[in-house]
């Protein structure tokens, strides 16, 4: 355990000390002397963000269900706490037993966004664990990682001992069993890694050499031992309805980003939006049954006391039994003052009817995501909504008493023209006119429209994985155009920082040569890069310069479809041929139907038998 | 049905804010199926009111809140159910139905604190006793305070002497004296409520200013030992 007196001193000096105390309802504190394996679940961001992440709750409870494992949580300390810790000599610790993370067997990071990578390095350093995998001895913890960004693990390959690719609910216990055996026979890092590298879904970066061509693109990737797989298949839970889901969730003391019960209703998405990585890597769609969900909701509501159940998935309105589920939940929990919410709404009529059910409880702002300003561009990205859908949706919303509407867009999408960009403004004004065209007695509240624009970041395993991102200057040109054109006190225009999106693009499609730039950036003081108050573009450019990395090569360059991509050795089940075909269709603005309407032959149902999609 | 509840807030739970406490109780009531009354409207809130919320970092042996229930349940059930749901550090130690309309948050007038604070560069801690007595002989102790109202900083000077009741310095074991660094233990009764409020840290600040003592207020350990109502010039327990 860390020194309690220095810890108390530190807590008195920092903002939101409750981030570091643990002790929440349903947290699990075991006697660390009495377990075989200590697993530190690390979220490389601040407590309030990490505690809102569903995967943490699933794996935390899954691991702690095993008597021989203690899983404890670790978050990135905010800058004020980090200063105190370094001053007081407090190493990074777990919340439950306040145990230094270097005393754990596993230090596991979840990779939710690329901009958290420098926090991983910082957390290892704060935990007195060698940052580079090659420097770790048998007595050091195994540093592992998983989550959506693990689909391109290469930029952090030098720091991580092994990755779990795909859904970890099943394989994580297999890994624990194998480790327990190794530990009881005298753990040897190399032997352990060799054994688990043969498990499906495990990637041990140090077992591969990458060879490059003269133009800096990848020539090939070679395993250095026999028996190490050339292709890593993602892990997938075949029967989601029967898979593990916790009936308890830790209830934080302080307000977190999502302060409610997340009820995962399905995984995967059939819409096939071409920019969306989640829509490709989480295939196939697997639903939970209404029965299972109602039972789960009951247990979770009883064990947490939350006042809100949020139906989560990539596109909740696509759940086949949504109406039944919503009405069951609402009738059951109305008395108890528990609300039901749907975070991802679509602009179609069906969604609106569901909304009618839900709105009885609370009337907060409404958010829609048309993603692009013109029909042509929405067709390019295969976002199957029309302007008519938007009109119907907002008309309905205004008539029902809403007056705050937020619309999400991206700029920098492939083939985008000035007209497409101005379409964003036009849609905003259209929404405004719809409001004021309503008879006065029907309008309620003060109209507030927010147009929120983010800069498109091409992601691996999407049909847009080959395209060059807009340059920072191009992004600013488009932003300035919108800034100039949107002049209305009812309409607020927001945009994301193009510099952050540029860096995200570098890291998202980077290769393992980026590890040294990440290390350098951290040395220069970069951390919490996803937070605009911390992000320092100049330092990043200095890090790239000093390590001889051409960042434009990763962010801005258009790739040929026959180029070997850094993540090509991972098989998500969706064929590369399918992605290429989608890329071609995008260029012509040809739509691909929703998979529920008929199979589009992406390959997933050949790769993973048993998946219904 | 108004249930008056006495509870503690100790250990690391002292780092939970008032708003966090409200949320924490709401969830504990739900988990324990306590028949709590909710406010009307789109965002119903449980009808609870906590007296004189503690500042972050201060412990307490005696916090009070009033809880409105839809139906009567035995006090003991309430205490047992809640203590099963509440985190270690927050314990309900008493509960009693009260019929007065004066809810505890507006009725409470005084708080009694124990303060442990390090004092540096003092030869003899007994000096401090004398200092305090002399300080409190003043009929006026002026202190500047800064408040933020509607985003603007407002500074005013107020007399805090009427807000200070009894102050005593605990006897010190001679062994804990280490050169010129001392652990000072104080007990003080301070106004806390609608009719005047003095935070224990402000009390320390004013004392430090008066004496010029080298005192580490930031690191002081402060604990509320009790809270009182003032009725006809006398103080009594809210229970």
Image (cartoon, helix red, strand yellow):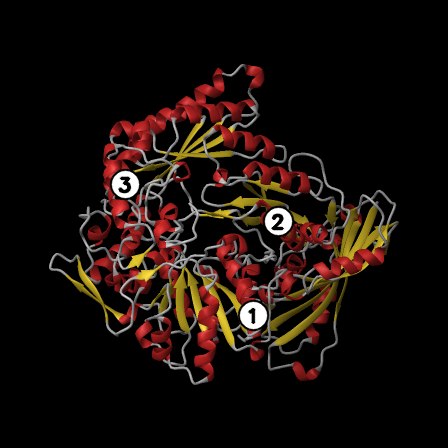
What's the chain of the residue with tag 2?
A
Query: Residue A66's mark?
Result: 1
**Residue that sits furthest to the top in the current view:** A439
Determine which residue is flagged by label 3. Answer: A582
Of the numbered discs 1 and 3, the one sitting upstream in the chain is: 1
Residue B79 occupies which quadrant of the picture?
Answer: bottom right
Q: Are marks 1 and 2 on the same chain?
A: yes
Determine which residue is flagged by label 2. Answer: A297
What's the chain of the residue with tag 3?
A
- The image shows residue A198 at horizontal and vertical percentages of 35, 70
**Relative to the observer, which residue lies in front, A575 or A112?**
A575
SS class, disc 2: helix
In space, the residues marked 1 and 3 are separated at their CA atoms by: 44 Å
Q: Is residue A592 left or right of residue B43?
A: left
- The image shows residue B162 at horizontal and vertical percentages of 75, 53
- Residue A102 visible in the shown view: no
- Determine whether A248 is above or below A429 in the image: below
């Amino acid at each position: 355990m860390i020194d309690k007196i220095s810890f108390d001193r530190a807590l008195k000096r920092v903002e939101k000390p409750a981030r570091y105390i643990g002790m929440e309802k349903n947290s699990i504190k075991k006697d660390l002397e009495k377990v075989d394996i200590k697993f530190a679940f690390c979220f490389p961001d601040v407590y309030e963000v990490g505690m809102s992440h569903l995967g943490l709750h699933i794996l935390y409870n899954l691991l702690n269900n095993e008597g021989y494992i203690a899983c404890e949580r670790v978050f990135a300390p905010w800058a004020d706490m980090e200063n105190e810790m370094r001053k007081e000599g407090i190493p990074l610790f777990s919340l439950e037993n306040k145990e230094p993370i270097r005393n754990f067997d596993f230090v596991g990071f979840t990779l939710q966004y690329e901009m958290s990578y420098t926090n991983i390095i910082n957390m290892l350093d704060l935990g007195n664990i060698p940052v580079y995998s090659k420097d770790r001895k048998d007595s050091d913890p195994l540093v592992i990682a998983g989550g959506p960004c693990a689909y391109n693990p290469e930029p952090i390959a030098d720091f991580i001992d092994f990755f779990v690719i795909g859904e970890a609910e099943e394989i994580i216990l297999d890994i624990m069993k194998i480790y327990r055996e190794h530990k009881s026979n005298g753990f040897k890092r190399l032997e352990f890694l060799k054994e688990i590298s043969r498990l499906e879904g495990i990637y041990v970066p140090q077992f591969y050499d990458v060879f490059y061509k003269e133009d800096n693109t990848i020539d090939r990737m070679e395993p250095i031992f026999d028996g190490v797989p050339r292709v890593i298949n993602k892990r997938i839970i075949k029967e989601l309805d029967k898979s593990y889901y916790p009936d308890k969730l830790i209830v934080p003391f302080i307000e977190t980003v999502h302060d409610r019960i997340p009820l995962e209703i399905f995984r995967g998405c059939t819409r096939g939006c071409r920019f969306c990585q989640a829509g490709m890597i989480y295939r196939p769609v697997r639903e939970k049954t209404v029965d299972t969900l109602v039972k789960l909701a009951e247990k979770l509501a009883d064990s947490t006391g939350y006042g809100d159940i949020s139906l989560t998935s990539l596109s909740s309105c696509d759940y086949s039994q949504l109406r039944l589920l919503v009405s069951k939940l609402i009738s059951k929990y109305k008395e108890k003052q528990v609300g039901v919410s749907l975070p991802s709404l679509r602009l179609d009529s069906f969604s609106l009817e569901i909304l009618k059910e839900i709105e009885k409880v609370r009337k907060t702002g409404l958010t829609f995501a048309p993603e692009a300003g013109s029909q042509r561009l929405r067709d390019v990205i295969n976002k199957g909504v029309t302007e008519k859908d938007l009109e119907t949706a907002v008309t309905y919303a205004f008539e029902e008493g809403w007056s705050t509407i937020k619309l999400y867009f991206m700029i920098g999408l492939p083939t985008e023209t000035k007209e497409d960009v101005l379409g964003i403004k036009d849609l905003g004004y259209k929404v405004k006119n719809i409001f004021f065209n309503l008879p006065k007695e029907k309008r309620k509240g003060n109209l507030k429209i927010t147009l929120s624009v983010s800069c498109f970041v091409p992601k691996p395993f999407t049909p847009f994985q080959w395209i060059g991102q807009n340059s920072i200057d191009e992004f600013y040109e488009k932003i300035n155009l919108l800034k100039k054109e949107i002049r209305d006190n009812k309409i607020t225009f927001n945009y994301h920082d193009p510099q952050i999106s540029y860096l995200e693009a570098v890291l998202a499609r980077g290769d393992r040569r980026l590890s040294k730039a990440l290390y350098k950036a951290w040395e220069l003081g970069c951390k919490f890069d996803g937070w605009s108050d911390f992000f320092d573009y100049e330092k990043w450019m200095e890090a790239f310069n000093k390590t001889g990395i051409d960042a434009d090569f990763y962010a801005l360059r258009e790739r040929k479809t026959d180029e070997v991509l850094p993540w090509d050795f991972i098989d998500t089940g969706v064929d590369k041929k399918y992605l290429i075909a989608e890329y071609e269709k995008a260029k012509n603005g040809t739509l691909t139907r929703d998979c529920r309407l008929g199979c589009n032959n992406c390959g997933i149902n050949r790769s993973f038998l048993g998946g219904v999609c | 049905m108004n249930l008056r509840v006495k509870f503690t807030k100790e250990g690391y739970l002292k780092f939970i804010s008032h708003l966090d406490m409200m949320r924490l109780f709401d969830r504990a009531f739900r988990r324990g199926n306590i028949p709590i009354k909710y406010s009307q409207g789109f965002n119903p809130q449980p009808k609870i009111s906590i007296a004189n919320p503690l500042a972050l970092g201060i412990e307490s042996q005696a916090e009070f809140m009033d809880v409105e229930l839809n139906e009567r349940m035995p006090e003991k059930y309430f205490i047992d159910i809640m203590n099963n749901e509440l985190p270690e550090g927050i314990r309900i130690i008493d509960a009693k139905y009260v019929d007065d309309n004066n809810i505890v948050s507006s009725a409470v007038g005084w708080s009694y604190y124990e303060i442990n604070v390090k004092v540096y560069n003092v030869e003899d801690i007994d000096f401090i006793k004398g200092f305090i007595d002399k300080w409190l002989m003043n009929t006026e102790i002026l202190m500047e305070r800064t408040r933020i109202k509607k985003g603007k900083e407002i500074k005013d000077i107020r007399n805090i002497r009427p807000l200070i009741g009894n102050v005593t310095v605990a006897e010190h074991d001679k062994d804990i004296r280490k050169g010129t660094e001392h652990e000072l233990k104080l007990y003080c009764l301070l106004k806390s409520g609608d009719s005047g409020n003095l935070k224990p840290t402000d009390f320390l600040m004013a004392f430090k200013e008066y004496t010029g003592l080298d005192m580490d207020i930031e690191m002081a350990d402060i604990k509320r030992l009790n809270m009182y109502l003032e009725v006809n010039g006398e103080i009594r327990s809210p229970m």
